[in-house]
Amino acid sequence: MSDTFVIVGGDAAGMSAASKAKRENPEMDVIVFEKGEWVSYAACGMPYYVKGAVENLSDLVTVTPEQFRDERDIDLRTGHEVVEINPGAETVTVEGGSERVEQSYDHLLVGTGATAVEPPFDGLGLDGVFTIHDLPEAEAIEDYVTEYSPDSAAIVGGGYVGIEMAEALSERGLDVSLYETLPHVLQPFGDTLADVVEEHLQTQGVDLHLDTAVSGFDGREAVEHVVLEDNAHAADIAIVGVGVTPNTGLAAQAGIELGDTGAIATDEYGRTNYENVYAAGDCAEARHVVTGEPAHVPLALTANRAGRAIGQTVTGDPEPVGGTAGTAIVKAFELGAARTGIVDEERARAVGFDPVSVSISAPSRAHYYPDGEELTVTLLADCESELVLGGTVVGREGAKRIDTIAMALTAGLTVSELRDSDLAYAPPFSPVWDPVLTAAKVLDGKLGES
Amino acid sequence: MSDTFVIVGGDAAGMSAASKAKRENPEMDVIVFEKGEWVSYAACGMPYYVKGAVENLSDLVTVTPEQFRDERDIDLRTGHEVVEINPGAETVTVEGGSERVEQSYDHLLVGTGATAVEPPFDGLGLDGVFTIHDLPEAEAIEDYVTEYSPDSAAIVGGGYVGIEMAEALSERGLDVSLYETLPHVLQPFGDTLADVVEEHLQTQGVDLHLDTAVSGFDGREAVEHVVLEDNAHAADIAIVGVGVTPNTGLAAQAGIELGDTGAIATDEYGRTNYENVYAAGDCAEARHVVTGEPAHVPLALTANRAGRAIGQTVTGDPEPVGGTAGTAIVKAFELGAARTGIVDEERARAVGFDPVSVSISAPSRAHYYPDGEELTVTLLADCESELVLGGTVVGREGAKRIDTIAMALTAGLTVSELRDSDLAYAPPFSPVWDPVLTAAKVLDGKLGES
């Protein structure tokens, strides 16, 4: 008897699960329902398509629908929307074309993803106002820039998407203004890193408006201004990137429990409150490796990994989905900016730690070796356990060093254990003490005093 | 009463110890005897001085003798050679200028370093034949190239020094031949990595002679040929870089015990068999973090870290010197090549593991993002414990990712724990699955089969 594995949503989590399940058990019936036409695409690459660094939108597709069907023998049904999950009957109700059918499942994966938040702004419907969360939107932005050659852009939101789009539209020749309601851009990256990025954005010509609330847009047919509390600035195109919200409606209606974060609650195998219903990717929670608590960190690797693990689990070989450290990196013009774990003391206190942190600057290469760049590293630890809790790295080269800190907190290393780790040195690649080690050395000194 | 801390040798280990001891206890008398004139210099930078990437030899000096004396209050005596250690009397005998004096110590650090091996070659005394292990030699090579404009260079030895000098002399316009007695260059980096480097060296115009024994050099005053078993090749300059040997004569004469590696045996605090005599840096052993056994890995970070720890220990606050994973990285023309831990199965078996390994190639950035480069990652683990034992990374960008593997083995992670680590992803910096994670994923699959 062959099991049927039904997957709702054909992006990172869903297609990873489908592929892995088929690889582990080629006899399994694996059916994926995707309401759109695109599957398995790199949403993170969209700003680079707008920028012009990626020529074709289709380059962002890792595996085509045909490949999934023909090479991986997955029953992928694009243009099919699951409109109801019935855990009691173990079926889903699907609309596609003009049909409405019931499909039974032995195992179900909810991989419905997340949607760009649309704030209650006036003028969201004007031409030239975009969010950016799927390929058709990326294409629409690119088309708009090409067709209307706008002079000025208003970016609302200083998260990754906002910053990446600021770079993309600057590269296209637009004057870019960026609006953020908080005192800093990249809020999850902490203030020290944000200071470095903000100075760089300004150097790159971005007109930065922090602590600034946008109320909407005005214009006749198309956007002409971004409207603030007490004035308005000209804008020929506007991008709203103020975060994403997990798509949980379908799950919630079916009695699948949500966690405190608002995303679908899951156990270490990605299971929901129904034993044979799983959730993964941007719609689901994952366990935070530092706090051990459920977190909602909608990032590609977490989605891929969880999907893959669930694909294995449903074939009878249970595999934990892994945790998240919230490790992230973003390119901001010439800078790389990265974070992992818990990066601010307030947040650390809120989850029960007694934090101490340092921030250091050091060159990315030996001081005498050409073309080194300054890296700023922050590192946060718990005073009592001396465990590494998190950190940030920002600079023109070497921000991927964040992985060293991510490894330290994943492995539960103390600050002195990190300091004593044997990292690679040669003049073209690092100072003798890698900047991360220098940060650990300084932080360990501070722990010794306290 | 103020203690006296005497240090033999003013390079990485010695000056780190001196500086740390003074910082922790400004009352301590810290005396460093250095037989040469240079202290605290970056030996690793010498090839880049010859290459022309570093303008002045003095740029390689991190802290000058004057700074050590004036700013750090260290009694640094250059041009002073310790000729005897007398552990019974707790004194050292020192020759400097025309004097010979006894200096008593409460704590002694032996930081005598290592010397480039001089193989029993004919013609080592010819003009134009060099080893490269200290600044005067680097200067002599640079002067020779500038003065005589040699057309051809013979590099003997395919370790880091040989490869870095091949790059340096190619950049200076010489035709470079490289001779290695073993079947591969970079022997401690394993065959898979060596294959990649060798192909690249040839692409860069290096005439590579593997499995080739050199017997010496001939010429009238200056070198004219490198002599092989059955023929000879023209060479206007020759660099011999066949490894280093720890300087242990002084220690051995004093009854300080050497380990099986030939370097000075030490405990976790860097102590020798005499309780108040320490050894660190290129003359001493360090504990290997994978095998737990003593190892001799003469690298800058190990020396710096051990010196620093000993500088703290002698002030009454004991600090372990830390282990070594043998993590190393080398630039070979356009490539970065890196290793950590145990990288070949034969070596793993010799120390009691049941090894399994994989080698994968993956892009350094998202597949659609411009200017990504192929990275080749090898990963080795123990079948029974599934612990990560070591690995290598080679490619035109991103070889510093070796640090992720170094962290995994330092922390004692299994392959699946490495695979599940949350590393940073964004298209300009990595594929969704970092190449190191991909290697772990593939290796974990292989472990599952065995």
Image (cartoon, coloured by chain):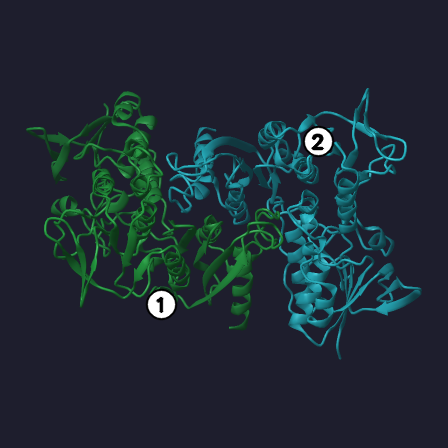
Chain colours: A cyan, B green
Circle number at residue B424: none
- Vertical order, B421 against B74 (above or below): below
Q: How many marks?
A: 2
Residue at x 90% of width, y 64% of height = A97
Percent position (x, y) of residue A50? 70, 44
- Give the residue pinned by disc 2: A176
User: From this viewpoint, is residue A268 visible?
Assistant: no
Question: Residue, x 18% and y 57% (percent of image)?
Answer: B225
- x and y percent of residue B11 in the render? 26, 37
How many other residues sit within 10 Å of disc 2, few (<14), some (14-19) or many (≥20)?
Answer: many
Residue found at the very far bottom of the displayed protein: A1
In the rendered image, residues at marks 2 and 1 fall on the same chain: no
Left or right: residue A171 compared with residue A430: right
Mark 1 residue element: helix
User: Which residue was labeled with disc 1?
Assistant: B346
Q: Quadrant of residue A322?
A: bottom right
Q: Residue at x 46, y 61 (%)?
A: B378
